[in-house]
Image (cartoon, rainbow, N blue to C red):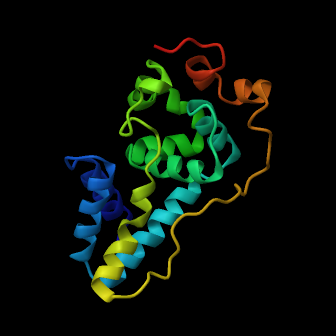
């Protein structure tokens, strides 16, 4: 599977009707139509692309947007970020603060968190299991590529709860989501 085919499949998934779980089910069904090697490749690409966003600054962005973010939650945030499209994702990997310009993120900032629906929430756990379900259905065996799991970013660690550091590294997101900022 090429990078282009991977990103097109992600894009088509997000265009499907229904909630995220239904969209993930659609993806799993689409993957069952591909050769098994492409299903395995899709799972590997998904994991690799997600890992490219596995930085402390990105975790700080997720932590700021969600008013807290566990390790698992960060993984699911990365998967959600991927579904915003290749351009948005690749820019955010280089500059996490660019998320402040993304309409979906700005829409979150415009409303109190208590008003966010499940579809609004910036996490997409079920996306990680589509290839596994497709592989199981087609082969009857577990997929060797494990789903994303909680881990620690590989770059230099910093305190993502230190407000001064977060404000300095993510000034635009801080303006939208920082403590004391009245949302909605």
| Residue at x 46% of width, y 40% of height | 122
In front here: 81 or 118?
Answer: 118
Mark count: 0
Q: x, y (%) of residue 33?
A: 21, 76
The N terminus appears in which quarter of the rendering? bottom left
In front here: 13 or 91?
Answer: 13
| Residue at x 23% of width, y 68% of height | 30
The answer to which image quadrant residue 181 occupies is top right
Q: x, y (%) of residue 50?
A: 52, 57
Report whether 32 appears left or right of 89: left
Q: x, y (%) of residue 63?
A: 63, 37
The C terminus appears in which quarter of the rendering? top left
Say above or below: 53 vs 5.
Answer: above
Q: x, y (%) of residue 136?
A: 35, 81
| Residue at x 57% of width, y 56% of height | 52
| Residue at x 65% of width, y 28% of height | 170
Report whether 63 appears left or right of 31: right
Report whether 160 appears left or right of 10: right
Say above or below: 138 vs 157.
Answer: below
Say above or below: 102 vs 145.
Answer: above
């Amino acid at each position: 599977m090429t990078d282009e085919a991977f990103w097109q499949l992600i894009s088509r998934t997000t265009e499907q009707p229904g909630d995220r779980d239904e969209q993930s089910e659609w993806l799993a069904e689409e993957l069952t139509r591909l050769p098994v090697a492409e299903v395995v490749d899709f799972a590997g690409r998904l994991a690799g692309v997600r890992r490219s966003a596995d930085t402390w600054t990105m975790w700080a962005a997720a932590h700021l947007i969600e008013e807290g973010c566990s390790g698992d939650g960060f993984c699911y945030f990365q998967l959600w970020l991927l579904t915003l499209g290749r351009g948005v994702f690749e820019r955010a990997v280089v500059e996490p603060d660019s998320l402040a310009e993304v309409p979906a993120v700005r829409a979150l900032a415009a409303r109190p968190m208590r008003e966010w629906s499940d579809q609004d929430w910036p996490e997409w756990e079920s996306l990680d299991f589509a290839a596994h379900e497709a592989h199981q259905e087609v082969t009857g065996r577990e997929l060797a590529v494990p789903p994303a799991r909680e881990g620690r970013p590989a770059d230099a660690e910093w305190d993502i709860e230190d407000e001064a550091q977060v404000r300095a590294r993510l000034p635009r997101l801080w303006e939208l989501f920082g403590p004391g900022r009245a949302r909605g």
